[in-house]
Image (tube, rainbow, N blue to C red):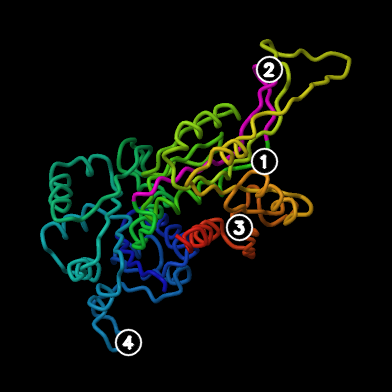
Amino acid sequence: MKKNLVLGVSGGIAVYKALEIVSLLVKRDINVNVIMTESATKFVTPLSFQSLSQNMVTCDMFSEPKAWEIQHISLAEKADLFLVAPATANIIGKVANGIADDMLSTTIMATKAKVIFAPAMNTNMYENPIVQENIKKLKSFGYEFIDPAEGRLACGTSGKGKLESPEIIVDKVLMELNKDKDLLNKNVVVTAGPTIAPVDPVRFITNRSTGKMGYAIAKEARNRGANVTLISGPTSIAAPRDITVINVSTNEEMKNEVTNIFDEADIVIKSAAVADYKPKNYSTQKIKKSDGELCIEFIRDNDILAELGSKKKNQILVGFAAESQELKDNAMSKLQRKNLDYIVANDITASDTGFASEDNKVIILSKEGKEIYLDKMSKEKIATNLFDIILEKR
């Protein structure tokens, strides 16, 4: 069943970012109902939010109802979570002092769902003692806040007051909406991204992994209540909140970090694209260009997954197989050779999935011989399906 989020949008230049919040939530199968204040409609039209959410947008307390129900009560009761983004000093002050004089403030007063405010305003306004006292007061009543970011503001000044990025806000929402904490108190280790094999001080060999799949898996485990450690090779992805992130570069560094925490892990998912080979001889000086050919001899590097498989006790060990041919056969061979419980196989020759894509298409194989085919879907949904499959027999 879809989760329901009510998004309150108050008036400020950051309103346009709320459109991205709606888009990201809808892509993650969340039903979004939007309530806009009158001032918010001066920045972005209700039609824009209606188009993205595929739901009617509520603005006026006294407009003709679309159904025979009291709107502020029905939306208040419908909400699994209530998010106000951007939250201006005005709406924060109203709620803190019990004022309910428009659709948004009235619905917030009527809901029993958790309410999260994401403030956005001028730095001086945000730091104003009255605003800070209102925030403190609301926190004491159980309301939560996503602190604004620092940077250049629309008014031309710099400081704290920017609406936090839509990705971080959505990340927080997904954490709150996942009430099925079926990994509570479990220790989950995820590896993600590429590793590099240095050639000299300025050159290295790597691969096209972006880390998106591994980061999606780590977030899904966190949302289900797990204590998550993410061991990440070089990526451009921001560190997820409430996850322990260990940054590494080389195969050796990743091996050491995974090995150090393997014994305490309940589930280990090795989605990183680890370099299999490294230069036999590393040059401490930059290799200079010459008229001749450059030949580099490579040697095998650590097989981290095989090493973990050889020392596995009660852990569930999951590997990934990125293949360009004989996908299932190669993946099954890897699963058996490395003593894995599951392996996730994907075809790297596909143009619309895999590396750098937001989507993936995989086969999940189990050591018992089960085969699960997941057609093209977002990497977040792949991660959800993966944990559903792992937890089926637990």
Q: Is residue 240 above or below residue 45?
A: above
Query: For the residues carrying marks 4 and 3, which lies nearer the camera in this image?
Result: 3
Mark 3 surroundings: few (<14), some (14-19) or many (≥20) residues within 10 A = many
- The CA span between labels 4 and 3 is 49 Å
- The CA span between labels 3 and 2 is 41 Å
Residue 64, quarter of the rendered image: bottom left
Task: Name the residue beneath numbered marker 4.
Answer: 67
Task: Name the residue beneath numbered marker 3.
Answer: 366
Q: Nearer the viewer, residue 292 or 83?
A: 292
- The CA span between labels 1 and 2 is 20 Å
Please, what secondary structure does the residue beneath circle 2 have?
strand
Please, what secondary structure does the residue beneath circle 3 have?
strand
- The CA span between labels 2 and 4 is 69 Å
Q: Residue at x 26, y 54 (%)?
A: 88
Mark 1–mark 3 contact, CB under 8 Å?
Answer: no
Q: Nearer the viewer, residue 265 or 24?
A: 265
User: On residue 208, which mark appears?
Assistant: 1
